[in-house]
Amino acid sequence: MRRTSTPNATRKLSTELEGLRHMDEYEVATLIGFAVASLRNWRSMARGPSYVKMGRSVRYRLKDVLDWMESHRVERRG
């Protein structure tokens, strides 16, 4: 008998793979609401989200961008 994956396992795998999706700097700039020039400046100063350099191309993993955004979250006290 052949096993098939459960809907929950398939959904979990899909979510994990989405986090590994690579985005270009224009997609990231749109996502975070900053200019592409800001991303370029941050890269030159070793700031901002982690990125992958493939030849002359720069790509960002969605998970890394979201983690970076979360690391800059400020909790309100009150």
Image (cartoon, grey):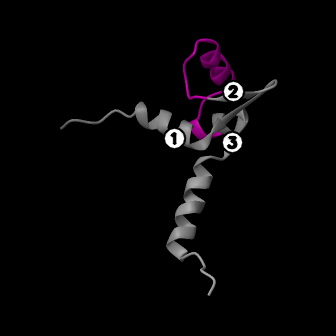
Tell me the residue at 72%/36% (across/down). Answer: 24
- Identity, as a three-letter code, of the amino acid under mark 1: Leu
Q: Residue furthest right?
A: 56
Alpha carbons under labels 2 and 3: distance apart: 16 Å
x and y, in percent, of residue 60 in the image: 65, 35
Along the polypeptide, which appears first: circle 1 or circle 2?
2
What label does residue 13 carry, if any?
A: none
Please tell me which residue lies in front, 33 or 14. Answer: 14
In magenta stretch: residue 44: yes
Above or below, 77 relative to 38: below
The span shown in magenta is: 30-50
Looking at the rendered image, the quarter that the C terminus falls into is top left
What label does residue 36 carry, if any?
A: 2
Alpha carbons under labels 1 and 2: distance apart: 17 Å
Alpha carbons under labels 1 and 3: distance apart: 12 Å
- Identity, as a three-letter code, of the amino acid under mark 3: His
Please tell me which residue lies in front, 45 or 20. Answer: 20
The residue indicated by pointer 1 is: 66
The residue indicated by pointer 3 is: 22
> Is label 1 or label 3 in front?
3
Q: Residue furthest left?
A: 78
x and y, in percent, of residue 48 in the image: 55, 24
Quarter of image, res 76: top left
